[in-house]
Amino acid sequence: MLNEPNHLLWSSIRTIMLQKNLDVTLIKVPAHADDPLNNHVDALAKAAHTDSHLSSQPSSELLAPCILQFNCLPVDMNIRKFIRNIFDAKSLLTLALLPRFNSYSLTSDIDWACTKFCLNNNKQFVSHRNGHSEFCSFRIKLALDMLLTLTTLQRRKPHLYNLSWLCPQCNSSPETLDHLWT
């Protein structure tokens, strides 16, 4: 039950059907089929969506055998996916709070969805060596500012790399990632 989408809604519907001894048959109607009953239901849903008098039902009034909550809100999605998302968010926040990122920005400025997407989607970039993705390694180094540019080397080892050195290709600007990509 907790794996189905909108499980709180469906659980409430099933409970009402049992309490009122209703026999309901669900029929899939193709979108934009101009079915009169579907059009009526769409109009009701739109009216309810814009009605300012409606309020959400407290979780104590929901008709479900159990209600998982997070920050006092009912969780109405696949529980495994929800827990995975919580752990992913915690891991990304832990990463963002490392001392190396203190000077960059606030954690609220980070595009978390994009960061997770970039770090997780590496299936199409698998190399032939041991099945590990070289592109995934590149993305992690890029996100952690670990790609070796002259500016990075100058910051890490100023005794080896003169701070006055510029980009070896143009010899007019410091060699940063932004400079290399423009």
Image: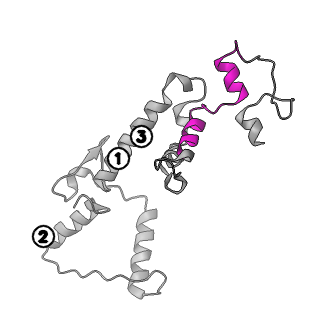
Q: Which residues are magenta?
A: 136-160
Q: Disc 1 residue type?
A: Arg
Indicate which disc residue 25 carries: none
Specify the principal SS of the magenta part: helix
Quadrant, the N terminus: bottom left
For residue 172, side relative to residue 133 (left or right):
right
Q: Disc 2 residue type?
A: Gln
Name the residue located 55 percent from the left edge and 45 percent from the top edge.
134
Q: Alpha-carbon distance for marks 3 and 1?
A: 9 Å
Is 86 within the magenta?
no
Is 140 within the magenta?
yes
Which of the two marks, 2 or 1, is nearer to us in this view?
Answer: 1
Name the residue located 52 percent from the left edge and 33 percent from the top edge.
107
Name the residue located 36 percent from the left edge and 41 percent from the top edge.
87
Compare marks 3 and 1 and give the one earlier in the sequence: 1
Q: Which residue is mark 3?
A: 89
Frontmost residue, 22 versus 172: 172
Q: Quadrant of residue 28?
A: bottom left
Compare marks 2 and 3 and give the one earlier in the sequence: 2
Residue 101 location (% of width, % of height): 55, 26
Secondary structure at badge 2 equals helix
Quadrant, the C terminus: top right
Rate crowding at label 3 as few (under 14), some (14 to 19) or many (20 or more) other CA atoms within 10 Å. some
Which of the two marks, 2 or 3, is nearer to us in this view?
Answer: 3
Considering only vertical position in the picture, is 64 above or below 106?
below
Q: Which residue is mark 2?
A: 19
Q: Which residue is mark 1?
A: 84
Residue 46 location (% of width, % of height): 45, 69
